[in-house]
Image: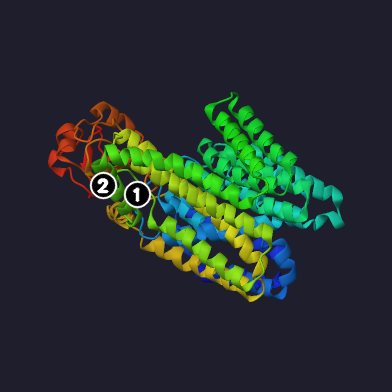
Amino acid sequence: MIICGVFVCAAVLAYRFQKKIDYFIAFSMILMTLISYLFLQIGHIEIGLFCVIGINILAMVIFILICLKNSDAVNKYVFTPGLWGTIFAVAFFYIFSQGVDISKTVDSFFWVGTPKLLYYSDDIEFARTRVINIIHPLLLCNWGYLVEKTCVSWNDSMLLLSKNTLMFSALLPLGDVIANKELSKTNPQKQFAIFLLASLLIPCMSFFDEYNQFDADVILGVMLGMGLVLFATAIKKDDFIIHIIAMSYIVAALLTKRSGVIFVVLILCGIIFLLCNKKQLKLSFLYIIVNFSFYVISQLTVSKYALAIAGTLIFGLALSYAFRNSLVRKVWCIALVIFAIVGSVGFYFWMNKSDYYREASLLYIHTIFTTGYSHVGNFIKLSLVAFGIICFVIYCGVRYKQLVKKEDNEAFILACLTYFAYLFIMLFLYVVLIIPANWHYGMVLAAIDRYMVTAVIMLLCVTFYIIVQYCKNGAIYVLFICLALSDVLGFSKYILERNEAPKYDAVTDSGIVLDMDTNIGYIDLKNGRSMAFEFAMYPAKSTNAFSGHEVEENGDELISKEELESRLSGNEYIYIDSITDGFVSKYSSMFLNADDIKAKAVYEFNEDGKLILIK
């Protein structure tokens, strides 16, 4: 009855406000947030989830109808490049994340593709996070629309109150608004104020660390994609202001994560190449100076990364200037330099360590075409490579049917080159470095692989920008309907049939009543090896898990009993997912009955501080 009542109220109010799209969108956003939050706070997690799903369906259907009736205005103000790029990037990542065991993998696609817009904290409750995951695409759409349509002072105060990824989402459409210059005809002061928000706040956001490190990979890709889109727009319109905004996005990408330097270098080399080809050398130097200066200021030192940026860009600028009269020569020159460097190193290893090289190559091929996780972590999967292929096929279809402008072609080609260059770099690192590395160093290299996600989202932003730009009318609504279906069907299936269900069932079947204040420790021997523990507040994910004393692959050392007790002291209950003989022998004194120690079991502390089996 409660769910039916919510649906009826939502339908009535949505119909009442359908002629005023601003009110409807604001209402749907507020309603979804409040309803989900209310049910979660009173402990009805599943009801809250189904309410959000139902409201999503209702809002999507009515929103599509409104869009169809107001297609011209909607295309101008709602379907902006960054918005579409982000929505589809997140939606595709959800689809490709099906079947990933998020309890085991902190960098799985499910978490990588999900900026947690609300309630973010290090020990965020899993139930709450699931609701945020579901409402993210529509919330992003609503928020972006409101930011564009409301007064600047309200935008400013709301943005500054939100020190999380919502700030990034809110600013994504601004560049396109400025690029279209819709506001300049009626309110020049407002346009200038929005320009200040876009050009000044975006780089500053990079200093905030409230967002999760894996969300930052997504943000990095969005910033790079938006930078390319705005660069193409600036070239088309020959507008210096838009160039400045494009620089702001690239600077934000540079400052978001230190590891993003390699992407910025690759993209800026392409931008400088294009500018030199158009004989805009001053603008090329400006892109170099702005990025180099911001990075030095942010690091408070001329680090090796800053020197790498400056050296690479100056080299690219000199190379482009030397071959300024021949586009073909430039391309061949750059390709030959890359081939010579990488090829010579590869040839050396092939001649001197052929067995090792072949083994590494086979392992690389194996990890590309598998959905499991190898001992080095989540290396370049087929799904990430498939994203690039999908984008290329979609673009070819658009290119065949429509006359795509030269500048948009250049932006897409630059995004593709960056994508494949990073894929090639990962192959090089994998083959040359991963086999001789020890376990710890191997994990460091595996972490680099996460940024394939960045490359994919960057490519998606540019791809869907071109789709929205050239495939209007029916095609855009087909894409939107597909998003609605994946939003509801994909997310609900993942929630109800997720791999973590056995853990959740083990806890609930033991008679424990879960609420937001229940603390449950989580113990897991990673991959069945006695080298590390993971701890998390159940039912939260294990992103902030504590890693124990890491040892060599053939070692058998565990953290001390005292340290384990200290780590578990703040929990009311303990869930043990997997154990080994070493675990039983070393920690049996912590349990009231050593015979009760087993996997997939829940324990609680008695009056003497001993763990007793609940189930």
**Label 1, residues with CA under 10 Å away: few <14, some 14-19, many ≥20:** some
Residue 103, labelled with which disc? 1
Looking at the picture, tell me which residue is in the foreground, 164 or 90. 90
Among the 4 quarters of the image, the one containing residue 181: bottom right
* Residue lying at 57% horizontally and 41% vertically, measured from the top left: 264
Is 569 situated left or right of 400 in this image? left
Nearest to N terminus: mark 2 or mark 1: 1
Q: Name the colouring of the figure.
A: rainbow
Count of marks overlaid on the render: 2
**Label 2, residues with CA under 10 Å away: few <14, some 14-19, many ≥20:** some
Looking at the picture, tell me which residue is in the foreground, 112 or 120. 112
Residue 577, labelled with which disc? 2
Residue 123 visible to an observer of this rendering: no
> Looking at the image, do the residues carrying marks 2 and 1 touch, with CB atoms under 8 Å apart?
yes
In the displayed structure, would residue 446 be above or below residue 509?
Answer: above
Q: Picture coordinates of residue 90 (x, y %)?
A: 52, 57
* Residue lying at 36% horizontally and 48% vertically, measured from the top left: 378
Q: Picture coordinates of residue 538 (x, y %)?
A: 37, 46
* Residue lying at 80% horizontally and 58% vertically, measured from the top left: 182
Looking at the picture, tell me which residue is in the foreground, 245 or 141. 245
Q: Picture coordinates of residue 349 (x, y %)?
A: 32, 39
* Residue lying at 79% horizontally and 45% vertically, measured from the top left: 193
Q: Picture coordinates of residue 555 (x, y %)?
A: 19, 32
Residue 261, labelled with which disc? none
- Amino acid type shown at disc 2: Asp
Secondary structure beneath dot 2 equals loop
In the displayed structure, would residue 540 be above or below residue 31?
Answer: above
Among the 4 quarters of the image, the one containing residue 84: bottom right
Residue 71 visible to an observer of this rendering: yes
Is 317 situated left or right of 70 in this image? left
Is 587 situated left or right of 91 in this image? left
